Image: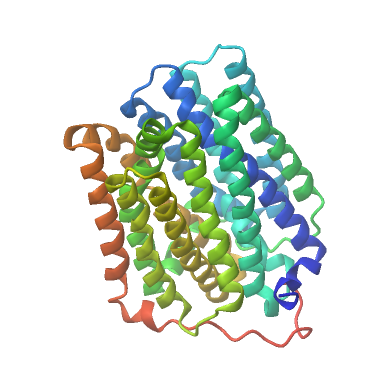
Amino acid sequence: MTDRLGPLRHRDFRLLVAGTATSSLGNAMAPVALAFAVIDLGGSAQELGLVVAAFALAEVVTVLFGGVLGDRVSRKVLMEGSAGACALVQAVLAAVLLTGAASLALLTAMGVVTGCLAALSGPSSQAMTRLTVPAAELASAVSVRRIGQTGSQIVGFSVGGVLVAAAGPGWAIAVDAATYAVAAGCYAALRVPHVRGVSAGASVLGDLGVGLREVLSRTWLWLLIGQALLYHLVYGGAQGVLGPIVVGDGFGRAAWGWALASLMAGFVVGGLLTLRWRPRHGLRVGVAMLSLTAAFPLAMAVSDQLALVLLGAFVHGLGLEVFSVAWDLSIQQNVPEDRLARVYSFDQVGSFVSRPVGLALTGPVAEAVGYDRWLLVVGGVMAASSLLALLSRDVRRLERHAPPPLGVDAPA
């Protein structure tokens, strides 16, 4: 295993992993805290969906601009500034919750601000991995970075559920603010080159057009971004709206935190699996594993046993992580460096543009047809859409690049 963790010997990669893992710790607490803050204010499932949808919509609106910035200015500076600003906003939100001055409108407004700030650096953060390790260690670096983030989220979800139940949502948001501040310090210490991906005087729309053409030139890329539209349309609300209500009401508030922790445990096991298992057609295997994500909503729909819900969450995380590593590595290995942030911005927009719609509609639709029945529909759509994507020859045939020998290349 030591050779598999080789990327951690690179200083900049250690700082990147430390920053992303630390902020992931706090960010795992934030959705648990936000959901129960809305419920404590008397919010319904529909109102909870609207609050979470506002945050998601802000991310979608901002992330394309963040992709252009990531190929124009220093990605390091962008990440540092975004984390610092998020720390300040979350600290204010924590103070509002702890003093009892919160309202649904205020939670929504501050969620929009945080979503915009976080989205600005999202594409740059994804594109940063390739700048911190040699190409020969990129596959290991992708897996190790994701293991660090998801391991932190396990702790965050578990502690977040207990902390919200014991002390209230405000303290969980305060921890999130502190982790953003630590992340900003890690990013400030990075020493990586700035790769300029746009020509001087180019317009934002022109830069986006270049990124869009890069996406459309690869069938596997635009097809799976499209599949993600449908996936997140149904699943975002299942986790963000129905999960806290169904699991929280059935097993207690702390149980929802444990369910999310089990989800993250599946991510970690999936990440460890990808350190050793590297199939030639990794994207094909990853898409097949993605169909396992249906296990979580199906378990919430049919089971009155917490153990089965936790198992469904674990299987969901396992399948999604194997896919995510294959997907991330496919992008890193096939997209030119000077367009990487813009491609990641389209990936994030394509993956999450439908999530606000799903979050807003989940409450009224689920209340009309029944929570359990809608969760069954969600599981069916998630499994079917993943398997249908395998009909594409481009998805099935894309091969993992063989890395060059260690020591013959440097970070890009």
Give residue 29's position: percent from left, percent from top: 58, 37
User: Relative to residue 47, is residue 211 drawn left or right?
Assistant: right
Residue depicted at 79% across the width and 55% down the height: 190
Q: Quadrant of residue 244?
A: top left
Residue depicted at 29% across the width and 54% down the height: 379
Residue depicted at 62% across the width and 60% down the height: 147
User: Relative to residue 374, is residue 245 drawn left or right?
Assistant: right
The N terminus - image quarter: bottom right
> Foreground: 216 or 207?
216
Colour scheme shown: rainbow
Observer able to see residue 381: yes
> Foreground: 332 or 342?
332
The C terminus - image quarter: bottom right
User: Relative to residue 216, is residue 32 drawn left or right?
Assistant: right
Give residue 350's position: percent from left, percent from top: 40, 55
Observer able to see residue 124: no
Residue depicted at 51% across the width and 34% down the height: 254
User: Relative to residue 9, is residue 262 drawn left or right?
Assistant: left
Give residue 278's position: percent from left, percent from top: 55, 80
* 239 over 199 or under it: above or below: above
Give residue 207's position: percent from left, percent from top: 51, 58
* 362 over 133 or under it: above or below: above
Count of numbered circles on the image: 0
> Foreground: 331 or 179?
179
